[in-house]
Image: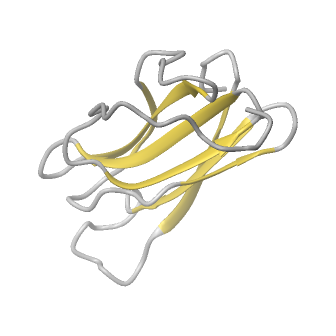
Amino acid sequence: MTDGALPEPNSTIIEPLAITPTLATDGTLVLLAFGSARTEFVSSVRGQFLELASTATRSPLMEIGLGNGPYPSEPSVAYDGYRFLVAWTDKRDRRWQDRDGVDVWYARVSPLGGVL
């Protein structure tokens, strides 16, 4: 991949009904994170590592953050040279009916696949 082009992907569903996918890379691995409505009252941020040079997955699907309320979280991902940082909003410390307020949460994720 000397030209920086991504390989043509084979379409694969990682999570049905996932929203707001986002990703970051360390140059070899890609961390794909997304919001997911788990139930009517629980939303979460889930993620999976993918190989940049292929369509292979590098890790099982992981739970990065568990939220509160019917609205899936909207994650954002960055890489700092050592680990990935995933930030998202949710209402776990608020009444889910309170649509005006959200909290910002984050988790560090190791390139080895664990939430720190």
Question: Which residue in the rendered view is the most extreme toward the front?
Answer: 3
**In x, y percent, where is residue 9?**
43, 34
Q: Is residue 60 above or below residue 19?
A: above
In the picture, measured across the screen, residue 104 lies left or right of residue 97, that is right
In the picture, measured across the screen, residue 34 lies left or right of residue 6, that is left
In the picture, measured across the screen, residue 85 lies left or right of residue 95, that is right
**In x, y percent, where is residue 106?**
61, 49
**In x, y percent, where is residue 7?**
55, 34
Q: Is residue 31 above or below residue 40?
A: above
Figure quadrant of the N terminus: top right
Q: Nearer the viewer, residue 86 or 66?
A: 86
Figure quadrant of the C terminus: top right
Q: How is the image coloured?
A: secondary structure
**In x, y percent, where is residue 88?**
52, 57
Q: Is residue 37 above or below residue 70?
A: above
Question: Which residue in the rendered view is the most extreme toward the right?
Answer: 81
Q: Is residue 17 above or below residue 20?
A: above
Which residue corresponds to the image point at 27% horizontal and 36% vertical from the top-left?
15
Question: Which residue in the rendered view is the most extreme toward the bottom?
Answer: 100
Which residue corresponds to the image point at 31% horizontal and 35% vertical from the top-left?
11
Q: Nearer the viewer, residue 113 or 68?
A: 113
